[in-house]
Image (cartoon, grey):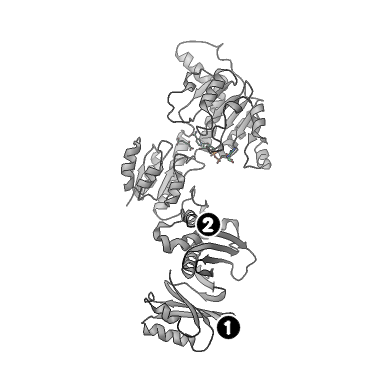
Amino acid sequence: MSKVLVSDPIDQAGIDILSQVATVDVKTGLKPDRLKEIIGEYDALMIRSGTRVTQEIIEAGTQLKIIGRAGVGVDNVDVPTATRRGIVVVNSPEGNTIAAAEHALAMMLALSRHIPDANASVKRGAWDRNSFIGAEVYKKTLGIVGLGKIGSHVAAVAKAMGMKLLAYDPFISTERAEQIGCQLVDLDLLFQQADYITLHIPKTPETTHLINAVTLAKMKPNARIINCARGGIIEETALAAAVKAGKIAGAALDVFESEPLGESDLRSLGKEMILTPHLGASTTEAQVNVAIDVAEQIRDVLLGLPARSAVNIPGLGPDVLEELKPYMQLAETLGNLVGQLAGGRVELLNVRLQGELATNKSQPLVVASLKGLLYQALRERVNYVNASIEAKERGIRVIETRDASARDYAGSLHLEATGTLGTHSVTGALLGDKEIHLTDVDGFPINVPPSKYMLFTLHRDMPGIIGKLGSLLGSFNVNIASMQVGRKIVRGDAVMALSIDDPLPDGILAEITKVPGIRDAFTVTL
Ligand SMILES: NC(=O)C1=CN([C@@H]2O[C@H](COP(=O)(O)OP(=O)(O)OC[C@H]3O[C@@H](n4cnc5c(N)ncnc54)[C@H](O)[C@@H]3O)[C@@H](O)[C@H]2O)C=CC1
Ligand SMILES: O=C(O)CCC(=O)C(=O)O
């Protein structure tokens, strides 16, 4: 039975799902050294934001197949290392959207009305109404940085509260922003005009310290900043100094450059600074959502099924995956075949998606072709996660073309591999009940289902050649299961595809190429 380690607090609903297929160990608060010591026993790791899954941890996780992040941000996982090692990383892109958006809105209102400090003062026994005069958000301008899932929900609610909405997001269209009721503006204008600025972006090299002394200086003195996205997007010392000096009116932060927050100037500020301990996703509803979402994906991957929200494999909905599955098998088979025909070191793989495969959602077929191509070199170590990276590291260039007009079959896939020993190509399609058929080898039309052991010859189409090859194979005790010749013109060049029952004995290829008329011969194991 598989073993899953849950190293952060996860809702029981997730544990119950994992327990259907695995032994589940819940060990929270592990020190990195201890995690490194034990991770080697586990097939899957499930985390929230508390566990840092570093290169060292991943490399010690020799059995790991999947890392599940019960939440959105995977910045606590070394995704490139996981990818290189063929480990799927999944998250829950939507399970805590509402929770995080509501926390940002709650922070905006709490900051405007000094709720945390007013509450603390009443609890201390005071009745001070003068120190807590607030500001209304109605008719104020909210600048939303990042108009994705959370930013869009914040926009919808803020609009209902009568706020004017500006947004900055270089990856969304003006039309989409308008649909959500936001005016898309550049960042400088947003900083200059907003009364409230709320951040809903990932932390990336571009967004790190996006809010710094220079950008803070552009803001209005009554500006208030809310960060429920990621620590490090704000330069904390610059923010603390700006609030202290009254250059902006305040800030509410849920996330920090270093968590848990240590010694910090932020702690010394009064009612104009609200700090929460990364609570954005901490609602009962969100925790159930993300636990179920991620646990289901871990269960599926452990059962050999695809994950629906993998961050390091092309994302596909279950319907698309179901539809593509037989074609993925076709792509892998053709990749494996063309790699063996090309022999040597492949430098270029041309993948042509034809007919109904020439749609955008067919991208995973390129990855599946590479997985097949690399199978001879890497065996079980290559998978959908690392195939592209492994190909890149081996200097294999990939060209993807699409030809929707190809009509020989409903959908077919053509792969051409160029390597140190020359160029070879294969085409395949699914016939009848989704059975894989090779429909072309090196430009010669054939129609054969692939079999485990195959022999291909390039020869001159002339009398007697099939008989001679048959006798030769017979003399080596090789049994032919099926045979087909593909040719373009009578007595021209031709390809022969033979399915054989056993692997070809050593030395026989050289004998085959001595048969008059046979130019070349290749044997493959699929
Ligand atoms: N505090 C908490 O507990 C939680 C925090 N989060 C964080 O909230 C953030 C947003 O999450 P979602 O809305 O779900 O993500 P999302 O992927 O739906 O939206 C992110 C948006 O940021 C935009 N973006 C990327 N780079 C940008 C840049 N340089 N400038 C402006 N916009 C940029 C993207 O185009 C996208 O529209 C993430 O950092 C996530 O980790 C999410 C859930 C809970
Ligand atoms: O797991 C958590 O509570 C943090 C959630 C979060 O930051 C995220 O989903 O990106």
Number of marks present in the image shown: 2
- Sequence-wise, which precedes: disc 2 or disc 1? 2
Numbered tag placed on residue 492 in the rendering: 1
Of 40 and 179, which appears nearest the observer?
40
Q: Residue at x 55, y 15 (%)?
A: 132
22 shown above or below 219: below
Query: Type of residue at label 2?
Result: Pro
**Residue at the extreme front:** 420
Of 168 and 473, which appears nearest the observer?
473
Instruction: Give me the C-alpha separation between circle 2 and circle 1.
Output: 38 Å
Whole-percent x, y for residue 349 in the image: 54, 62
Specify whether residue 433 is in view: no
Of 120 and 466, which appears nearest the observer?
466
Whole-percent x, y for residue 357 in the image: 58, 62
Query: Type of residue at label 1?
Result: Gly
Numbered tag placed on residue 364 in the rendering: 2
Q: Residue at x 60, y 27 (%)?
A: 214
Under tag 1, what secondary structure?
loop
281 shown above or below 413: above
Position of 407 compared to 465: left or right?
right
Of 19 and 231, which appears nearest the observer?
231
Q: Residue at x 45, y 11 (%)?
A: 125
Whole-percent x, y for residue 460 in the image: 53, 83
Tell which tag, 2 or 1, sits nearer the viewer. Answer: 1
